[in-house]
Amino acid sequence: MDISRLPTPCPVIDLASVQSNIAAMATIHPGRSLRPHVKAHKCSSIAAEQVRAGHLSFTCATPREILGLVAAGIGDDLLLANETVDTTRLGLLASAQEKTLITVAVDSLATINAAAQAGIKNVLIDVNVGLPRCGCAPDMAGSLADAARAKGMTVRGVMGYEGHLMMVTDRAQKQTQVHEAMALLTAAHGDVGGDIISAGGTGTYDMFKGTSVNEVQAGSYALMDTQYALLHHPFSQALWILGTVISVSPKWCVIDVGLKSLGMDHGNPTIEGFNVWFCSDEHTTIAPLDGSPMPVVGDRIRVTPAHVDPTMAMHERAYVLDGDTVVDEWAIDLRGW
Amino acid sequence: MDISRLPTPCPVIDLASVQSNIAAMATIHPGRSLRPHVKAHKCSSIAAEQVRAGHLSFTCATPREILGLVAAGIGDDLLLANETVDTTRLGLLASAQEKTLITVAVDSLATINAAAQAGIKNVLIDVNVGLPRCGCAPDMAGSLADAARAKGMTVRGVMGYEGHLMMVTDRAQKQTQVHEAMALLTAAHGDVGGDIISAGGTGTYDMFKGTSVNEVQAGSYALMDTQYALLHHPFSQALWILGTVISVSPKWCVIDVGLKSLGMDHGNPTIEGFNVWFCSDEHTTIAPLDGSPMPVVGDRIRVTPAHVDPTMAMHERAYVLDGDTVVDEWAIDLRGW
């Protein structure tokens, strides 16, 4: 089937590009030195590509991402890199521990108690390394680890997400700041112990040489978006939202891709050959760049989202392409919470 | 059940507020003078409340919204107020015509031909009244109506969405501009004929006195959001995304509501009693206003989205509240395309 027959709006993924991105990252961070973050794609078929590239440990942001990977038989070491006190969902994770190794991030006595009460066996101490979000103060990590061990849980190590540094564009400055952040994580690890020192993302994946970090949690590199493209990393755009031109006026045309099919927190999408005027719920108004012809109703247009993670979360399935030929269909099966 | 037992993040809807909003609008635009737009809530249970308030005609943005209303037995006059050349989906709409009256907006020969080919019986001419989006030039409306009739279809009238005027805050200026836009629609209707002259939204619902418009397509008024609240209309906030505090630091705390549970195109959400620092995929970092106490892990927080339409589209179900008591659960069953 050709893309001209796909129902729009829908995500389309270039198979060669996603495989190339996954291979490029696996060369730099092979095997367990990468713990791919599935929140970026929420798709067990992409996680399966990451398994084929040698990764067996995965990072998740929600219990449903973990449970979806378990259901798909993907990976043997799944980390919920996020806090929860939802005892129902923690109980589901605890039940899944018979099938695979599951580890839950904790950063407080409340999250430790909730995990212990639900029967979670393995935790990891989430340490704040500068981003004002989750994670305990570095000097509290040791006492939290002690509290978790006192509850009978295994403490596998530490994680610290330096999300505030992802988009620093000066590489020397970024390197310095990442190393400063990782010094906090290393000190916390000294108090916590365990085998895991986990950090990073697509924006900092190549900044850990000389640190103690032994696994990187990158996710967006597999599909990419226009924001991460600004960093000029060796990953190429592999995802677009395919749209159809539904209306043409003398100075603009309209495609059926809008706010409900695009993550908008990083701003408007981009479209090769067009200026993007604005997005509405189910529309984007665009105009051809100077000298380019106006499309006709029915033409297909590829829209590059500004932020991949929330974009994928809006769709039920993605179509996999070889050129303009549809070769597969992947369920976006890890959606929700 | 109390809201403290709900799985978060999830939409919660105050039943008294949504019913009050629906009643207030039905007083101003009773019965068929309102054609409620379901794209704002994508929920047939809310549409059923609108039926109970006397409305039987509905506006939809996607084929799936129409088919969902048909499946739920809601309404007797459903308008797809959007263009499509997807012959598969148009065919599904054509098949549903036996069950209810379905009308499809067209603005070009291509969309007329697609509708005719699929067996659509009723169309309406979408006229551009100033928003650079869909709709034919006003002086083309008559010839398009002729073309549709030549294909054997009934032309029920015209619609024209003055979306560029929704957020004009000076009421006198807005009134003038809406009347100018509606003069274009009225002229087009003179060339087209038919019974329907449809326009408007929550931002302009009270601007049509003295125009020929005989039905208003408002939708957001039922649940509201922080952007429409700026207009000081007689509709109150009825929707929040409920979150749980998952991490507390000395100067901020983090809730489990983020980019994947909030429409972000109108900016950050607001939270009563807190400053909102920033949203991540599954988190929002917030700080109590001066003098307010810091929450504790496990506390529930109501988040008011900046844009209701894409927010509702991100969730599978909403919980219906009487105060803090959960009295019902509504599927958000009109999602997708």
Image: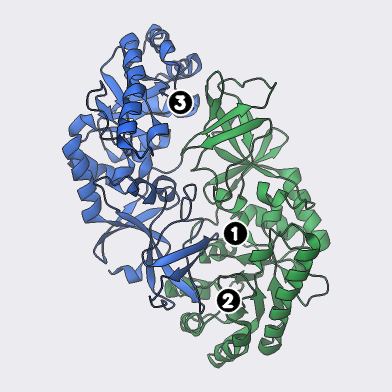
Chain colours: A green, B blue
Circles 1 and 2 on the same subunit = yes
Q: Quadrant of the N terminus of chain A?
A: top right
Residue A137 position in % (x across, y down): 59, 81
Report in which chain the residue with disc 1 lies: A
In the rendered structure, which amino acid carries the disc numbered 3?
Glu
Residue B98 appears in which quarter of the rendering? Answer: top left
Give amino acid for label 1. Lys
Q: Residue at x 55, y 73 (%)?
A: A134
Name which residue type carries label 2: Gly
Work out how far the residue at label 2 is from the one at label 3, CA to CA, in angstroms.
48 Å
Task: Estimate the x, y position of residue B6 in percent, counting from the top left.
Answer: 36, 67
Total numbered badges shown on the rendered structure: 3
Residues under numbered marks 1 and 3 in contact, where contact means CB atoms less than 8 Å apart: no
Q: Earlier in the sequence, mark 1 or mark 2?
A: 1
Residue shown at the point (34%, 9%) measured from the top left: B191
Chain for numbered disc 3: B
User: Could you tell whether A105 is left or right of B179 in the image?
Assistant: right
Circle 3 sits on which residue? B83
The foreground one among A200 and A172 is A172
Nearer to the camera, A156 or B179:
B179
Q: Quadrant of residue B186?
A: top left
> Mark 1 — residue?
A39
Q: Is residue A9 above or below residue A179?
A: above
Callout 3: SS: loop
Question: Within 10 angstroms of label 3, few (less than 14), some, or many (20 or more) residues?
Answer: many
Q: Is disc 3 on the same chain as disc 1?
A: no
Residue drawn at (32%, 27%), measured in percent from left and top? B176
Q: Which residue does the numbered mark 2 point to in the structure image?
A: A135
- Residue B265 position within the rendered picture, expressed as x and y whole percent measured from the top left: 49, 47
Front-most of residues A182 and A56? A182
Alpha carbons under labels 1 and 3: distance apart: 33 Å
Instruction: Tell which subunit mark 2 falls on.
Output: A
